[in-house]
Image: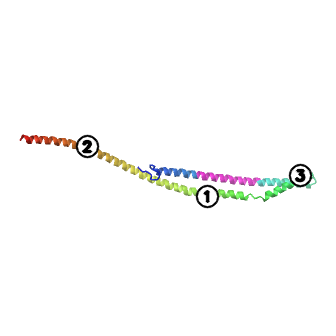
Amino acid sequence: MFWCAGCGELICVCVCVCVLSIQADDRAVDAQRVLEDVGKTHLRAKDLDTEAKNLLKKILALLQQLKESGSSGGVVPSENLAKMLSEAERMVKEMEKRNFNPQKDAAEKERDEAQKLLHYIEANVTKQYDQNEAAAKRVKGLLKDYVAKLKDLEEALKQAGDMVKKANSQNGLNTEALEDILVIIELTVLDF
C-alpha cells in the first residue's frame, strides 16, 4: 500500500488530481461568469450611451420647436417658459460636454482583461490538469502492477506456508516411523 508522507492518506495521488480537477473546473466557471458579467456591463454602457444620445436629440428637437414657435409669431413664450428653455439648453450643453467614453473604455478594458484571464486559465490550468491526469494514470498503472505483484507474492507465501505445514507433518510421521524402526532394531538386537 502507498501512504502519502505529506497528508498520510492512502493513494492520495488520485485524490489530489481529483481535487485539482475540481478546482480547475471551478476557476474556469468563475472566469466564464466574470466574462459574461463584463459583457453585460459593456452592453449596458452601450445602451446607456445610445439612450443618452437619443434623449439629447429629442431635447434638441423640442428646443428647436419651442424656438420656432416663439420666433414665428405664434404664442410668445412666457417668462417661466423662457427660464425652462434656458435651463433645458444648459442641460443639453452639459450633456454634450459629458463624455461617456471613459465608462465605455473601462467596460471594454474589463472585458479584455476577463478574456485574458479566461485564456490564461484555459492555457495554464487546463495544461496542468492534463499533466496531473497523465501522472495519475501512470501512477495508477504502477499501483496496479504493484498490487498484482503483491497478490502473486501473497499466493507464493501461502503455498510456501502450506508446504512447510506438509513438511512438518511428514517430518512428524517420519519421526514416528523412525522411532518404531529404532524400537524394532533394539528388540532385534536384544533377541540375538
Name which residue lies at 79% across and 58% down.
Answer: 96
Identity of the amino acid at label 1?
Lys
Q: Circle 1 is placed at which residue position? A: 116
Residue 171 horizontal/vertical position (percent): 22, 44
Q: Is residue 27 magenta?
A: no
Examine the rendering and report whether any part of residue 64 can be seen. no
Give the CA distance from mark 1 to mark 3.
Answer: 54 Å
Identity of the amino acid at label 2?
Lys
The tag on residue 81 is: 3
Image marks 2 and 1: residues in contact by CB distance under 8 Å: no
- Seen from the viewer's position, the closer of residues 15 and 76 is 15
Q: Residue furthest right?
A: 73
Residue 101 horizontal/vertical position (percent): 73, 59
Name above or below for residue 180 compared with residue 138: above
The tag on residue 166 is: 2
- Seen from the viewer's position, the closer of residues 5 and 79 is 5
Name which residue lies at 8% across and 41% down.
Answer: 190
**Mark closest to the chain's N terminus, 2 or 1:** 1
In this rendering, position of residue 41 left or right of residue 171 = right
Identity of the amino acid at label 3?
Leu
